[in-house]
Image (spheres, rainbow, N blue to C red):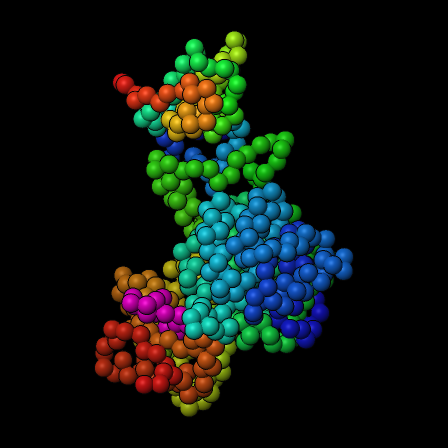
């Protein structure tokens, strides 16, 4: 392992190369472009023995990755925002056909108005597509999680695609120190990919057949069980990684959660920013903490309950970086609130939204989020709608 | 793997993969149709146009070179009746 200063996009591409992907099928889109550019370079230079498919759209990028994966090749794609939206049809099909494609998703807001900047509206739009979905909050995590994604998705008891989320620009275009592996170190960590029913002329199989009303329900139940059971493998892979390489990943990450009265629940790069705020405010006597929902799908119900219903935490302020129009506004907030619904000692759940379309969240705005929690506790009332922090009105 | 008639979810292969090649012959789609093609062999010139155009491969050639629809698989689309250059195929209502 060597620690190098590297642009996070390049590190993610290197993680895919480290996994020796056999097919890269991707279309450039800001802010993901550097990832596929670097992979194209590695293939062109002969440093990576892979087929790089230059497709004409993201819809085809996803389709070709799906086909490659079912043919038995380790397949990788990467996109952002509108690209993911265009892929949507095949995103759903890829998980339904149990093809363990890995996608690096540089999170970016959806148009309109056109925004190339970061929020989580792209991934939230794909919430119910049946992919394992994991958030990274810095370059090191994006690198590690992308590499591990292959081992998780390709496990014979899983066979599901995995999407790794990392914030566009905030991470993709930043140079960070990242511990990078040598090929030798990880050689036996990632076993060769074997799909048990791959497309093979000597042992013919049909994929993607019609499912009449008599079979569709059973097919969906099987898929739901598969992603629920993938949790065991996710934990096992992360544990093995921690034992061998020393960096531990958990479905729900805590920062001062054990003795905090109010925690901010985050996903992605805002996690570390919130931690800086907590460090500073603890000096001023505030018992605040941060809880990061790293694993988004399968949703870690038990882990979340264990962390949030610990008797100390009185209020959890959930920071959503996307909006569900006409609904609860906060997608993560409403999931967290319903996950805790049956718990006896559950904290108050308050929803805030900020950082949409690339707007920075300032120090005082993080403080404001915690203060909203304090106010709700004082008034003993959960607000009935999400509060948008930093909104001009 | 030969699927049972109405499998439980645990009995499906991942992603509904079919690993028994050609098993679609076990699924008879013939009962989808409301009209069936009837070939008038007096007019038939045995050209095979119906056999070429049939999207279900439901026409089978017999020992005399005539092409006959297999009603187990014919869905009654009527493409054969439209394409037949000898106008010898008539679509008739299926009677029980």
Seen from this angle, which residue lies furthest right?
Answer: A46
Q: Does the magenta stretch include residue A289?
A: no
Q: In which quarter of the image is the N terminus of chain A?
A: bottom right
Q: Which residue is drawn at 34% across and 67% down?
A: A324
Q: Is residue A296 above or below residue A286?
A: above
The quarter holding residue A382 reads bottom left
Position of residue A167 in the picture relative to residue A316 (left or right)? right
Position of residue A194 in the picture relative to residue A336 (left or right)? right
Dominant SS in magenta: loop
Number of numbered tags placed on the structure image: 0
The x, y position of residue A315, in whole percent, is 32, 75
- Residue A137 versus residue A256: which sits nearer the camera? A137
- Residue B21 versus residue A339: which sits nearer the camera? B21
- Whether residue A4 is visible: yes
Q: Is residue A321 magenta?
A: yes
The quarter holding residue B30 reads top left
- Residue A309 versus residue B84: which sits nearer the camera? B84
The x, y position of residue A159, in whole percent, is 52, 47
Position of residue A26 in the picture relative to residue A274 (left or right)? right
Q: Which residue is drawn at 42% across and 21% down?
A: B87
Range of the magenta residues? A317-331
The x, y position of residue A307, in whole percent, is 39, 68
The x, y position of residue B69, in whole percent, is 43, 19
Seen from this angle, which residue lies furthest top?
Answer: B64
The quarter holding residue A347 reads bottom left
Q: Which residue is drawn at 59% across and 38% down?
A: A199
Q: Which residue is drawn at 76% across and 57% down?
A: A46
- Whether residue A251 is visible: no
């Amino acid at each position: 392992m060597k620690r190098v200063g590297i642009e996070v996009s390049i590190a993610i591409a290197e993680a895919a190369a480290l996994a020796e992907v056999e097919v890269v099928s991707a279309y450039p889109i800001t802010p993901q472009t550097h990832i596929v550019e670097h992979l194209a370079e590695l293939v062109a230079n002969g440093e990576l023995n892979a087929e790089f498919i230059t497709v004409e759209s993201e819809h085809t990028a996803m389709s070709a990755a799906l086909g490659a994966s079912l043919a038995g090749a380790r397949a990788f794609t990467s996109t952002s925002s509108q690209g993911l939206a265009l892929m949507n049809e095949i995103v759903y099909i890829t998980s339904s056909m149990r093809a363990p494609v890995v996608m690096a998703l540089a999170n970016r807001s959806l148009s309109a108005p056109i925004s190339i900047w970061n929020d989580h509206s792209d991934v939230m739009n794909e919430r119910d597509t049946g992919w394992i979905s994991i958030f990274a909050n810095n370059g090191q995590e994006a690198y590690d999680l992308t590499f591990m994604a292959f081992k998780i998705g390709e496990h014979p008891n899983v066979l599901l695609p995995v999407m790794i989320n990392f914030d566009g620009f905030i991470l993709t275009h930043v140079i960070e120190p990242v511990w990078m592996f040598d090929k030798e170190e990880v050689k036996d960590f990632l076993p060769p990919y074997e799909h048990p029913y791959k497309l093979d002329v000597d042992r013919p199989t049909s994929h993607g057949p019609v499912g009449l009303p008599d079979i569709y329900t059973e097919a969906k139940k099987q898929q739901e069980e598969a992603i629920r059971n993938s949790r065991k493998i996710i934990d096992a892979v992360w544990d093995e990684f921690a034992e061998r390489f020393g960096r531990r990943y958990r479905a729900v990450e805590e920062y001062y959660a054990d003795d905090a009265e109010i925690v901010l629940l985050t996903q992605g790069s805002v996690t570390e920013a919130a931690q800086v705020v907590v460090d500073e405010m603890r000096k001023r006597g505030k018992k605040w903490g941060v809880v990061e929902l790293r694993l988004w799908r399968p949703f870690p119900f038990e882990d979340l309950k264990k962390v949030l219903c610990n008797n100390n935490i009185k209020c959890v302020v959930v920071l959503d970086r996307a909006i569900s129009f006409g609904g609860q506004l906060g997608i993560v907030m409403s999931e967290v609130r319903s996950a805790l619904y049956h718990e006896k000692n559950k904290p108050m759940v308050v929803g805030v939204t900020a950082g949409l379309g690339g707007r920075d969240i300032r120090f005082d705005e993080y403080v404001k989020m915690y203060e909203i929690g304090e106010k709700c506790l004082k008034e003993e009332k959960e607000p009935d709608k999400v509060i948008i922090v930093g909104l001009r009105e | 793997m030969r699927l049972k008639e109405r499998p439980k979810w645990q009995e499906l292969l991942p992603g509904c993969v079919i690993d028994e090649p050609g098993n679609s012959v076990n699924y008879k789609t013939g009962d989808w149709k409301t009209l069936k093609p009837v070939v008038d062999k007096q007019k038939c010139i045995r050209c095979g146009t119906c056999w070429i155009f049939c999207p279900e491969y439901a026409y089978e050639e017999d020992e005399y070179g005539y092409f006959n629809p297999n009603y187990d698989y014919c869905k009654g689309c009527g493409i054969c009746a439209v394409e037949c250059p000898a106008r010898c195929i008539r679509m008739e209502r299926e009677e029980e």
